[in-house]
Amino acid sequence: MLDTIFSIFWGVILVLSILSIPYIIIRYEINRHQDKKKEAEGIYIRRVNRFEVWICIFNPFIPFLLYMANSHSGNMGIWFNIAGIALALFFFLCCRYTLVAYVKLSPEGIEQRMWSARTTVYPVNAIDGIEYYKALAVDSQDLVSFYSKSGKLIAAFSPIIHKNYRLMAIVRFRIDNDRWADLNN
């Protein structure tokens, strides 16, 4: 009886995860296309890279394996299925992250959205510290981090890989002139 319930459960999760793949990829490409249009207005948005989005293709594997295990192998046990639910939930959260996560640099400030639906906005004046980390290996990427006056990390960018050259120019202006550039100019 329990195997039948888990087989139905994993079958439903498998169908949902397969249907989510095209949605995630199409939505990401639409967002990326809209972000390119906003660049002309001086608004720069950084999202996760395409590799991270294409990882969502592996999302159905856990539900598929557990569906097959429950429907063909017999009693898999409740703890095995609970561990599978936790693993599947982790993959779904990673896929959600690829849809919602972004960092936006605009004249209003830096806007950041990560895992939750809550968006945090920091005006440019709130940025008090900047750190630049040079990549140690060729495969790694350089990193620019912004910190608030209280020392809290506001945002982190990879300026070269994600082509945030405007960000590098703004940071350079801040370092050279001890003030932020007028982003409306």
Image (cartoon, rainbow, N blue to C red):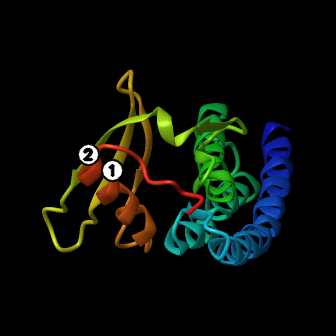
Q: Is residue 173 left or right of residue 135?
A: right
Q: Secondary structure at mark 2?
A: strand
Q: Secondary structure at mark 1?
A: helix
Picture residue at 77% right of the left edge, 52% below the top: 10
On the image, which quarter does residue 85 sit in? top right
Report crowding for label 2: few under 14, some 14 to 19, many 20 or more residues within 10 A (C-alpha): few
In this rendered view, identify the residue nearer to me: 20 or 145.
145
Position in image of residue 83 (x %, y %): 58, 38
Q: Is residue 48 left or right of residue 178?
A: right
On the image, which quarter does residue 44 sit in? bottom right
**Amino acid type shown at disc 2:** Glu
The disc placed on residue 84 is: none
Of labels 1 and 2, earlier in sequence is: 2
**Alpha carbon separation for disc pair 1 and 2:** 12 Å
Report crowding for label 1: few under 14, some 14 to 19, many 20 or more residues within 10 A (C-alpha): some
Can you say which quadrant of the picture contains the N terminus?
A: top right
Which circle, 1 or 2, is nearer the viewer?
Answer: 1
In this rendered view, identify the residue nearer to me: 86 or 115.
115
Picture residue at 56% right of the left edge, 63% below the top: 185
Which residue is under mark 2? 131
The disc placed on residue 174 is: 1
Picture residue at 79% right of the left edge, 44% below the top: 6
